[in-house]
Image (cartoon, helix red, strand yellow):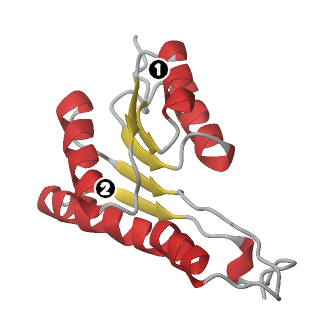
Amino acid sequence: MTIKNPTQNIHAFITGVSSGIGRALAERMLDQGMQVSGMARRGEALKSLEDQYDQFLGITDDVADSKAVANAVKAAEKHFGAINQAICNAGIYIPQSDLSIDPAVFCQQMEINYLGQVNVLAAILPLMEARQSGHIVLLSSVAGWRGLPLAA
């Protein structure tokens, strides 16, 4: 009797996959036999995953760009088929001194940390709704619960 791998037909779309939690999740899922489409701004990190895993598709772009996210989701589904899991992980933290606050830095962090997740949801939710299946995970920072040094 052949036992089928339950992760074999899972396609995960992960943002922020170039390092940290996103990369660790991608590697873990790939090691379990899942297909992973990973989106990040740093293409060299994506290339290393593509070189290591046949079932990885790297998409170099920015989650803050809603059209880029929509195109990334389309490319991922064209390459591996329907996305079963979406993990919104992309995020940045740029510490600032309390004496030199730059509003542009706050805007950049909001565009990636908040609107990036909204952009992924806007692109993926209608597809999952139409299929009546799928799972979405939104990751956030501990800073949402407790402030970080120099973050006030």
Instruction: State the residue lying farthest toward the left.
Output: 130
Please give the label number shown on residue 134.
Answer: 2
Q: Earlier in the sequence, mark 1 or mark 2?
A: 1
Give the number of marks.
Answer: 2
Please give the label number shown on residue 50.
Answer: 1
The kind of secondary structure element at disc 2 is loop
Q: Residues within 10 Å of mark 2 (few under 14, many from 20)?
A: some
Q: Nearer the viewer, residue 38 or 133?
A: 38
- Residue 112, image x, y percentages: 49, 66
Q: From the viewer's perspective, is 88 left or right of 134?
A: right
Amino acid residing under circle 1: Glu
- Residue 54 falls in image quadrant: top left
Residue at the image position 71 percent from the left and 85 percent from the top: 101
- Residue 34, image x, y percentages: 44, 30
- Residue 76, image x, y percentages: 27, 38
- Residue 145 falls in image quadrant: bottom right
Residue at the image position 43 percent from the left and 19 percent from the top: 3
Instruction: State the residue lying farthest toward the front.
Output: 100
The kind of secondary structure element at disc 1 is helix
Q: CA distance from mark 1 to mark 2?
A: 24 Å
- Picture layout, residue 112 above or below residue 54: below
Amino acid residing under circle 2: Gly
Q: Residues within 10 Å of mark 1 (few under 14, many from 20)?
A: some
